[in-house]
Amino acid sequence: MTQALQTGRQRTRSSILLKIVIPLLFIAAAAAFGKYMLSTKPQAPSRPVEEKVWAVSVVEAKLEAHQPELELYGKVETPRMSTLSAAVTAYVSDVPTDAGRTFAAGEVLLQLDDRDIRLLVAQREADLRNAEAQLAAENVRHNADLKALKIEKNLLALSQQSVARIENLNKRNLASQEQLDTARRSAQQQALSLNTRQQAINDHPNRQKQINASITRTKALYDAALLDLERTRISAGFDGRIAQLSVAPGDRVRSGDVLLTVYGLDRLEVRAQVPSRILPVIREALASKGNISATSHLDGQLLPLQLDRLAGEVNSGRAGVDAFFRIEAAREQLPEPGRSISIDLKLPVQENVVTLPPQALYGTDRVYRVKESRLEAVSVERVGDITLDNGKTQILVRSDDLHAGDRIITTQLPNAISGLKVREAGQ
């Protein structure tokens, strides 16, 4: 019985192994067949990766001499902007002009009521005449004192002789003591009168200085009144235009109140900021007394300009230096201060520069040339612009690495880099 149990167990194990091994063999055979099929599958031939070639337009570089142009934006200003204010307190009697009108030097722009000032002038004049009369009276008195001094000296001498005579008679008992005392008293009084006259003569220079000082003070007050009277007529000492009128007839103004604002027509100028890269060229031209001209179009008319000077300081936050352009135009063409205008500045002629379309410039200082069908970056300096006869604008660049005959691309590529393969359009 034991042997039969062992035989049954062995048969059970054999059947279990057959159930596991046979599926595994089928799976292994299927995997081997699939691998065989994949390895024997026909393969398509691989295509080599080709480098992309970019089509570009090019121009041939030519080293030439050109006069660069630079577009600036400026503002019309004037250093002769004057604010005229009242010098006296008075009513405005007449305003013969209006804001925006031009005027000539010395023309009356505004008239203040001058009646109060005229009364003050008359009073100051009377004070002056009184002081002058005092000086004349002092001179007359001094001349009279000089003549009286001689007479009083003679009278004193006679009084002294009389005293001596009476003293001689008194010694001989021919004259009384009372007569002698009377003679002596008369002589003393005459001496006192002579001393008073002499003192008046000696004090004449001091009195004369006092009167002269009074005349000077009164004359100054009189001149001040005349000046106030003159200032009731408001005028300017230059040809100009009225920018703003602040009063009307009948207004009462006090000393210091603003009446009107004017500016001179002969000193209108345009202030514009010049980039730092252009400053060496401009400074060299100004140092050599060269003329740098410019033009602007204002209200459909050509406005000629001339560079006058550069600013003496640089305001914070500015990248360049302000330049001042003198306006050389007729009076009727002159613009108003505060207007913004564009300026076409003509710089001195530059040698060995290359003319290129604006799209040839990458960034601010780089172009690309084609060398053996590949791009090569070249650093350049932009010296300005130029307008061709057909009206198109070209840029002027300069570089020691640019040579005549170089093929410069004029196509803006988004991924331009040295070594990029290109082909010229049309090839």
Image (tube, rainbow, N blue to C red):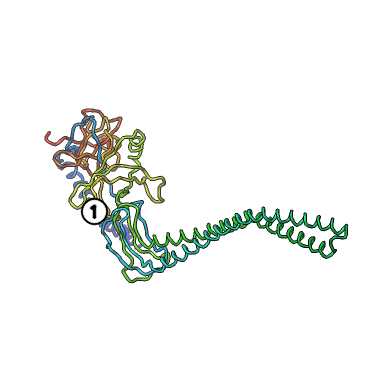
Question: Picture quarter containing residue 348?
Answer: top left
Image-based side of 267 in relation to 155, left or right = left
Location of residue 351 in the rendering, given as x and y in whole percent from the top left corner? 27, 30
Q: For the residue carrying disc 1, how many other residues have a C-alpha within 10 Å: few (<14), some (14-19), or many (20+)?
A: few
376 vs 2: above or below:
above
Location of residue 58 in the rendering, given as x and y in whole percent from the top left corner? 18, 35
Image-based side of 190 in relation to 180, left or right = left
Residue with the mark numbered 1: 22
10 or 100, nearer to the observer: 100
Res. 102 in view: yes
Q: Amino acid at mark 1?
A: Ile
Location of residue 9 in the rendering, given as x and y in whole percent from the top left corner? 32, 60
Quadrant including the N terminus? bottom left
The secondary element bearing badge 1 is classed as helix
Quadrant including the C terminus? top left
283 vs 271: above or below:
above
As drawn, which residue projects farthest toward the left?
A: 426
As drawn, which residue projects farthest toward the right?
A: 172
Location of residue 223 in the rendering, given as x and y in whole percent from the top left corner? 46, 58
104 or 125, nearer to the observer: 125
